[in-house]
Amino acid sequence: MTKFEEEVKRPVFGIGQSSIKPALGKAVEFYTDKVKEYHNAFSDMNKYIDVIESALDKKDEEIIGLKSQLQQQALPVVPECVGSYIEECKEDGVCLFGIFADASRVEHDVPDLVYFWLGDEGNNDELFARAWLDGYTVEKPQLFYLKNKMTDDFLCTNSGKFSEREKNSMSWRLLKKSFTKAEIESMETGSYELVPVEDGE
């Protein structure tokens, strides 16, 4: 119990002006000190809040900077067959470790084009893992026309039936006339010349 509280609680007989003034003065002094303490405490809290808000603003700026850096990093570019395989595996719940474990077996279930791209063609295992984890873009495969070296006609197909046509014939637009390297390698194209398809053709 403070001295002031003792004086307030003690019964006072014959209260006069001379005894009230000191008591009121002590009360005012007591409450003024308390107000100053609370004011100082609030000032300190506001300083801490300002420091915390400043730190949070810096963290937000760092996060924005890191996101920007991640977006600027180019996504790995993979062939269309690899992109399709990644999506199929994710839909089926296959994990990345499972794919590599499967690919390391002699009797693997990995599609041949993906298997050869993954290992034999260029050791693309790290690229595959980055594509799996970070996302990817699909490379546009280079397409080729197959031009007969003797007749200058181009090989076309419709529903699996092959024929040769002039480049500007009426049916040219309706037929499949460009092929990827993988498709060409699976066909016997001894008398055909590969003519690259230009963008916009």
Image (tube, rainbow, N blue to C red):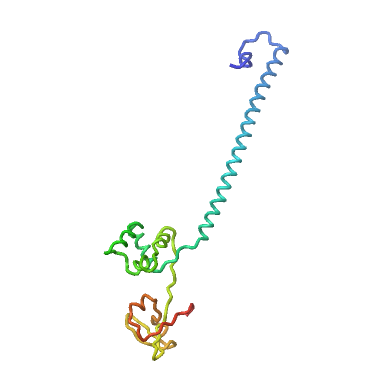
Q: Nearer the viewer, residue 56 or 39?
A: 56
In the displayed structure, 15 sits above or below 83; it is above
* Residue projecting furthest to the right: 18
- x, y percent for residue 118: 37, 65
- x, y percent for residue 105: 29, 62
Q: Is residue 174 left or right of residue 22?
A: left
Instruction: Determine which quarter of the picture holds residue 186.
Output: bottom left
User: Do we see residue 162 in this rendering?
Assistant: yes
Instruction: Determine which quarter of the picture holds residue 192.
Output: bottom left
- x, y percent for residue 31: 65, 23
Q: Is residue 188 left or right of residue 60?
A: left
Instruction: Determine which quarter of the picture holds residue 101.
Output: bottom left
In the displayed structure, 32 sits above or below 157; it is above
* Residue projecting furthest to the left: 107
Q: Is residue 14 left or right of residue 96?
A: right
* Residue projecting furthest to the bottom: 151
User: Do we see residue 93 in this rendering?
Assistant: no
Q: Nearer the viewer, residue 164 or 121?
A: 121
How many labels were placed on the picture? 0
- x, y percent for residue 148: 39, 87
At x 43%, y 75%, the residue is 142
Q: Quadrant of the N terminus?
A: top right
At x 43%, y 67%, the residue is 138
At x 55%, y 54%, the residue is 65
In the displayed structure, 83 sits above or below 54; it is below
* Residue projecting furthest to the top: 13
